[in-house]
């Protein structure tokens, strides 16, 4: 073969191969099946409305079979007390399952600490749950694909496939994951997928007497959550990790992250 | 409905003590077994690199210890897997990693990297020992076999895979293959271990782990620990052999029944001294590299002082000060470094230094793995890990002192048996 012919046929081959390869790329069936352009679940927390009663935590534990007394929880409420001297005190005893009923702050091994009203500049509550991130770190690190993202944007764990390595627990920047004490696989909030996909509400949102929590479809312009995300000044947690959370907060401030 | 128990321990609760503001689901999830996992792979990789120094670069001085290091590395290999399995909440599903590897995860390729590496080490040993195996078959077939020799013959026959050609060309080919495999093995060993470093270094949620230096630091400390372990074990096993020789305890001298007759206590002694001292030099080089990198990491963190530095600093300079600066850097690095540098190095001093080095590297793994979980994601609280000493259930055994000792002892048991088939201390030129 002459050199020129060789080059020519090589060029033809490379061009042909890349065309067919790109065609494969175009019709990646997973992509086609996975996208649900009309539905993406999102969550809105209005911290102004939360009073720290812990109803959501209770409801979640009962709804999702997380042993009531086990010290893990799919959702929890944090209390922030900003003192006049600039100190910020935070706690979440038992994930606030029993609500915040006193001014005793739980500091683990360091004991409890009683806050005096006159020292407090402001105090508020922040409910937390899985952010069902758009770029979830937990899905990225799962070695067997047991943690996965559904087409409508909910991150789930396959209890039958999880090997219990805990990498996702380490990988999640929000600390929402834990090992289920009975099933012994990774566990976390599912946005009550079993309920919302049948048109229901999440257990926590339903249990909240003050409407601090709302689940909604971010792709539906008439959805209250989508509207709030669009029209109000909402924030997300720990944006620096680049996971692009889908839980939005009204009334965040710099102490919360 | 899940049954409701009065109080149900969750994974990690048994050994985690929380202080100040820690999220409800945060525990020390990665405990002692995950400390041992990089430690063990590090030993495997390090031992292999040591053996390759001779095979690839022809560092003749390391010849004797190189063969031992290779066999020992093989014995350590299955043990690198053990901590991972012991740590899984669903150990029987471990195989899923091979069935549905999810390649965005740093752990997913572990099976593949590990298997590749195992194949390389396995085949290298085979080529190194092929001549020896064939000669042993020939010898054992001819003579009257006693006891263990009856078992050895069929094993050798299987291991030889029927390749019994001992012509000079065949042996030359063996040599070539060994050289090639040893060469290939170095990057793969470094990869195997650098990869363990990547598993930690890539966790962006963890302020202490996330650094691109992690894999390199891991490789260096791996080589350090591997070499130290080889020096130590070589010296100990040689000592054991010196003890066994006059007493006729041939169980410790498998090469004895392999036909190596010219063993004398004096010969063993001088060999032991020589190899230990030579290898110590290499240990020093790698130690310098390892320490430099680790210090660079700390300095860089302090200098850039990003948001997490406040809490990381408190962990490094206050809470873990003793573990990091006294145990790891003091006893594990500085002291053995000086011991190895001082003139007139004796085997005994080298051994003590190696014990310290091994301890230092273990502490380094500890300080990385446990230290990385010593503070909360909120940066407002701390977690302390208490190693379960007396187990009261499976979990506290697996992830406690018991499990750790199990992992530590296993390679020696395996080595004892492998050494019978592939005598690591054989000295004549039957093996490369
Ligand atoms: S919050 Fe954590 S567990 Fe939830 S999707 Fe994001 S990374 Fe995953
Ligand atoms: S614990 Fe389970 S879900 Fe989490 S990374 Fe491991 S296998 Fe995946």
Image (tube, coloured by chain):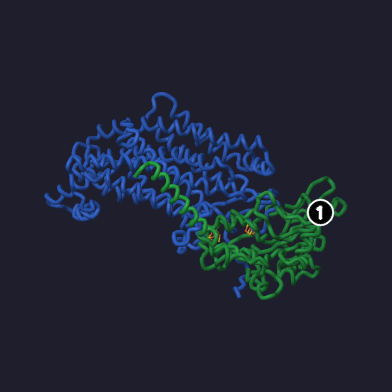
Left or right relative to B91: residue B306: right
Ligand 1 placement by image quarter:
bottom right
- Give the residue pinned by disc 1: A115
Q: Position of residue A58 (x, y in %)?
A: 71, 69
Chain hosting mark 1: A
Chain letter, green in picture: A
**Secondary structure of the residue carrying numbered label 1:** loop
Q: Position of residue A162 (x, y in %)?
A: 52, 63
Image quadrant assignment for residue A204: bottom right
Q: Is residue B268 visible?
A: yes
Q: Please report the residue visible at 23 percent of the width from the left and 39 percent of the height from the top.
A: B172
Q: Position of residue B71 (x, y in %)?
A: 32, 45
Q: Nearer the viewer, residue B101 or B355?
A: B101
Q: Please report the residue visible at 71 percent of the width from the left and 60 percent of the height from the top.
A: A247
Q: Nearer the viewer, residue A234 or A13?
A: A13
Residue with the most extreme right position: A118
Chain B shade in the render:
blue
Image quadrant assignment for residue A38: bottom right
Is the residue A69 above or below the residue B193 in the image?
Answer: below
């Amino acid at each position: 073969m002459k050199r020129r012919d060789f080059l020519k046929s090589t060029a033809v081959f490379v061009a042909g191969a890349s065309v067919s390869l790109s065609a494969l790329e175009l019709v990646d069936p997973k992509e086609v099946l996975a996208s649900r352009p009309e539905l993406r679940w999102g969550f809105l927390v209005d911290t102004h409305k939360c009073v720290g009663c812990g109803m959501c935590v209770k409801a979640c534990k009962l709804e999702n079979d997380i042993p009531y007394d086990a010290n893990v929880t799919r959702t929890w409420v944090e209390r922030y007390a900003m003192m006049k001297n600039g100190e910020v005190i935070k706690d979440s005893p038992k994930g606030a399952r029993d609500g915040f009923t006193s001014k005793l702050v739980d500091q683990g091994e360091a004991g409890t600490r009683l806050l005096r009203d006159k020292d407090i500049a402001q105090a508020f509550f922040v409910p937390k749950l899985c952010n069902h991130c758009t770029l979830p770190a937990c899905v990225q690190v799962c070695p067997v694909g047991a943690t996965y993202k559904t087409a409508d944007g909910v991150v789930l764990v396959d209890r039958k496939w999880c090997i219990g390595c805990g990498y996702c627990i380490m990988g999640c920047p929000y600390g929402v994951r834990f090992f289920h004490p009975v099933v012994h696989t990774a566990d976390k909030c599912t946005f009550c997928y079993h309920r919302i996909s049948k048109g229901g509400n999440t257990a926590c949102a339903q249990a909240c007497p003050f409407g601090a929590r709302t689940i909604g479809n971010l792709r539906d312009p008439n959805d209250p959550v989508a509207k709030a995300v669009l029209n109000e000044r909402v924030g997300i947690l720990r944006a620096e990790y680049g996971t692009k959370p889908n839980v939005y907060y009204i009334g965040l401030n710099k102490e919360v992250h | 409905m899940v049954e409701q128990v009065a109080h149900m321990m969750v994974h990690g609760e048994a050994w985690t003590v929380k202080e100040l503001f820690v999220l409800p689901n945060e525990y020390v999830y990665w405990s002692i077994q995950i400390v041992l996992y990089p430690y063990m792979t590090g030993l495997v990789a390090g031992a292999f690199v040591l053996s390759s120094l001779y095979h690839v670069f022809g560092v003749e001085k390391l010849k004797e210890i190189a063969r031992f290091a290779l066999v020992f590395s093989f014995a350590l290999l299955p043990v690198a897997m053990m901590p991972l399995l012991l740590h899984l909440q669903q150990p029987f599903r471990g195989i899923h990693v091979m069935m549905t590897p999810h390649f965005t995860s740093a752990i997913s390729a572990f099976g593949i990297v590990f298997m590749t590496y195992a194949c390389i080490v396995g085949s290298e040993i085979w080529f190194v020992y092929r001549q020896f195996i064939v000669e042993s078959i020939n010898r054992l077939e001819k003579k009257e076999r006693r006891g263990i020799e009856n078992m050895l013959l069929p094993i050798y026959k299987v291991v030889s895979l029927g390749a019994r050609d001992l012509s000079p060309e065949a042996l030359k080919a063996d040599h070539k293959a060994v050289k090639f495999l040893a060469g290939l093995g170095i990057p793969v060993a470094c990869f195997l271990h650098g990869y363990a470093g990547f598993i930690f270094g890539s966790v962006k949620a963890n302020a202490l782990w996330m650094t691109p230096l992690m894999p390199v630091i891991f490789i260096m400390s791996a080589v350090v620990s591997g070499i130290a372990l080889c020096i130590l074990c070589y010296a100990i096993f040689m000592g054991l052999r010196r003890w066994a020789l006059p007493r006729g305890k041939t169980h410790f001298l498998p090469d004895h029944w392999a036909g190596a007759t010219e063993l004398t206590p004096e010969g063993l002694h001088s060999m032991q001294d020589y190899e230990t001292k030579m290898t110590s030099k290499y240990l020093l080089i790698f130690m310098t590299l390892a320490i430099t990198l680790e210090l660079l990491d700390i300095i860089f963190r302090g200098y850039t002082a990003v948001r997490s530095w406040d809490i990381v600093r408190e962990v490094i300079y206050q809470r873990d000060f003793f573990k990091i600066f006294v145990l790891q850097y003091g006893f594990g690095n500085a002291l053995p470094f000086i011991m190895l540098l001082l003139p007139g190095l004796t085997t005994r001093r080298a051994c003590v230094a190696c014990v310290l080095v091994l301890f230092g590297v273990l502490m380094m793994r500890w300080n990385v793995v446990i230290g990385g979980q010593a503070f909360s994601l909120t940066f407002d609280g701390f977690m302390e890990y208490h190693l379960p000493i007396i187990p009261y259930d499976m979990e506290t055994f697996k992830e406690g002192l018991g499990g750790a000792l199990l992992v530590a002892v296993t390679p020696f048991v395996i080595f004892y048996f492998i050494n019978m088939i592939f005598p690591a201390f054989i000295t004549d030129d039957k093996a490369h």
